[in-house]
Image (cartoon, grey):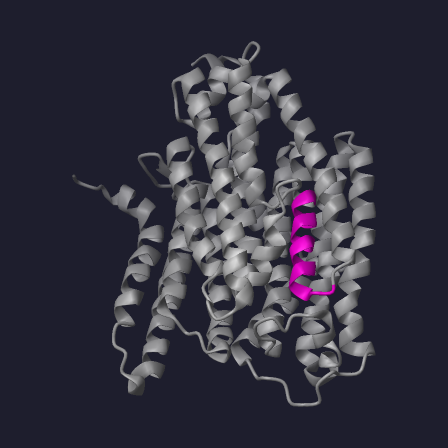
């Protein structure tokens, strides 16, 4: 089979990390203790070079405006945004893993290989509208994450968290697959756009609506929305700190980007189906905000607190689907970018402070702001941004979402979101108070993790820059991704003849 240049251009960004994922286990075959340090450097170098090459190649595609496709795989503007988003999260994670795994004494090549395979799955997931390919990509990025959750077998919680994540994920995947089966049976197509055309007029068949509902169960499980959030605290607590950060950011971001495709699909023109989907999203968003924020208040374990924080942020992002406009989707993409910096900084500080294994209680943060002042300031910025305090990027992201909700007449939901943000201040202040206002529990010098620390410092600086100059991201990436990467629902309304074609 001959592959044209444009088709090769489409698959190259994911082929590079896929090849690297296969090379890394080969590089670790030599068990000679004298060259273990060199092997460690080689495997991390392979991972970073692959991710960096894919990142710069995708950025080059963005700059030139090329949107290549290969079969059901299409690197349009929105897919390119998603690929860049995932690659940045992965690069952050690999850099933090360098210090974290070294100090835990668990430097295994399979960790990086699994991470790269998960990245490839996420790229495919965000770049297709074919439901079969969506399901295969979902499994490709989920199964490595199940393994990564339990990768440090010496920890008692690791296996428990990994098994819980796997079992609940299997149920969600089964619902997703059954939804695909029902939609194919009712429409005769696996293509999301064609399915949308079939469902866009008249009253959808109850089985087709059930198929959409089952499909949504699979999605909301991955974004940790209530009531499908139970796996999140256990999985985040069990996984290595950088992996927890990657799961909280990359998985949520990729699934929400695919949901944007679904909510811009033609079947949203059907008043009955579209209204029910938006109502369902409103209910899920409110439940997620309430459960996530109130449960986070009661946590004394830092990672579990961040897990419930991640659940609550899924609620904020789901509010964008209730507004359902192009501006709301742009606000969601901006929010996702700021969330990437906030959460990877918040999880990364665990590795930067040298908190290993289960040493993730809030009391471990006592006095750390004075021991490591630079990191203390950077992670404080991350917490303030997560709470939505100006002039951070998190504040501007929430402002954009709430503003669009109000413009679309959902004032009550905007008020719920604002009240949830006020509640969240209560638990985001806990680690800040511990770092600066409580005596240290351990007078010994903290473990030095310079690379992980650098990622936290970069996150803090970028959060402030994006909060002060949001236009660079909003106009440079978010707006083109929506305007050029999606067919607008409003355009279809203006041109009804498009539906019959």
Q: Residue at x 71, y 80 (%)?
A: 368
Q: Is residue 282 left or right of residue 136?
A: right
Query: What span is in magenta?
Result: 300-315
Q: How many marks?
A: 0
Q: Does the magenta stretch mainly form a helix, a strand or a loop?
A: helix
Q: Is residue 147 left or right of residue 251?
A: left
| The C terminus - image quarter | top left
Q: In the rendered image of this protein, does residue 93 appear above or below residue 374? A: above
Tell which of 351 and 201 is nearer to you. 351
Identity of the residue furthest to the top in this view: 202
Q: Position of residue 235 (x, y in %)?
A: 56, 56
Asked whether residue 112 is drawn in magenta, I would say: no
Q: In the rendered image of this protein, does residue 494 appear above or below residue 240? A: above
Q: Position of residue 434 (x, y in %)?
A: 78, 74
Q: Position of residue 186 (x, y in %)?
A: 44, 16
Identity of the residue furthest to the left in this view: 1
Question: Would you identify the image quadrant in which residue 453 lies?
Answer: bottom right
Q: Residue at x 63, y 85 (%)?
A: 446
Identity of the residue furthest to the bottom in this view: 444
Q: Position of residue 113 (x, y in %)?
A: 36, 62
Tell which of 421 and 59 is nearer to you. 421
Tell which of 74 and 383 is nearer to you. 383
| The N terminus - image quarter | top left
- Res. 472 in view: no
């Amino acid at each position: 089979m001959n592959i044209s240049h444009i088709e090769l251009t489409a698959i190259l960004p994911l082929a590079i990390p896929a090849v690297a994922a296969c090379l890394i286990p080969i590089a670790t075959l030599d068990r000679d203790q004298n060259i273990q340090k060199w092997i460690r450097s080689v495997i991390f170098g392979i991972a970073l070079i692959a991710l960096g090459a894919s990142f710069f190649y995708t950025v080059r595609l963005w700059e030139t405006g090329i949107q290549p496709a290969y079969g059901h795989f299409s690197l349009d503007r929105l897919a390119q945004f998603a690929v860049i988003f995932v690659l940045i999260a992965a690069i952050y994670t690999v850099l933090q893993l360098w210090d974290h795994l070294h100090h835990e004494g668990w430097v295994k090549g399979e960790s990086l290989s699994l991470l790269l395979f998960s990245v490839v799955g996420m790229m495919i997931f965000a770049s297709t509208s074919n439901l079969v390919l969506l399901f295969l990509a979902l499994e490709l990025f989920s199964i490595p994450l199940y393994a990564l959750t339990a990768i440090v077998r010496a920890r008692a919680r690791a296996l428990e968290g990994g098994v819980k994540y796997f079992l609940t994920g299997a149920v969600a995947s089964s619902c997703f697959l059954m939804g695909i089966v029902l939609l194919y049976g009712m429409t005769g197509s696996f293509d999301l756009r064609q399915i949308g055309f079939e469902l866009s007029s008249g009253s959808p068949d109850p089985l087709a609506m059930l198929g959409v509902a089952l499909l949504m169960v699979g999605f909301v499980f991955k974004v940790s929305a209530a009531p499908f959030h139970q796996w999140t605290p256990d999985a985040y607590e069990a996984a290595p700190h950088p992996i927890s950060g990657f799961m909280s950011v990359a998985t949520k971001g990729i699934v929400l980007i695919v949901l944007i495709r679904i909510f811009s699909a033609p079947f949203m023109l059907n008043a009955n189906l579209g209204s029910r989907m938006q109502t369902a999203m409103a209910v899920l968003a409110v439940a997620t905000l309430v459960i996530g924020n109130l449960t986070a208040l009661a946590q004394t374990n830092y990672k579990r607190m961040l897990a419930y924080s991640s659940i609550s942020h899924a609620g904020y992002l789901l509010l964008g689907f209730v507004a359902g406009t192009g501006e709301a989707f742009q606000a969601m993409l901006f929010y996702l970018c700021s969330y990437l910096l906030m959460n990877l900084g918040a999880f990364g500080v665990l590795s930067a402070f040298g908190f290993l294994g289960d040493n993730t209680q809030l009391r471990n943060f006592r006095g750390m702001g004075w021991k490591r002042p630079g990191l203390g300031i950077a992670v404080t910025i991350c917490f303030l941004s997560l709470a939505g305090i100006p002039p951070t990027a998190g504040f501007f992201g929430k402002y954009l979402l709430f503003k669009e909700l109000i413009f679309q007449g959902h004032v009550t939901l905007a008020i719920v979101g604002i009240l949830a943000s006020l509640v969240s201040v209560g638990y985001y202040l806990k680690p800040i108070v511990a770092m600066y206002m409580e005596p240290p529990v351990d007078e010994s010098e903290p473990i030095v993790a310079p690379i992980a620390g650098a990622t936290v410092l970069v996150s803090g600086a970028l959060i402030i820059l994006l909060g002060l100059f949001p236009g660079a991201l909003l106009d440079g990436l978010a707006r083109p991704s929506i305007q050029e990467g999606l067919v607008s629902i409003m355009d279809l309304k203006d041109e009804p003849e498009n539906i019959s074609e």
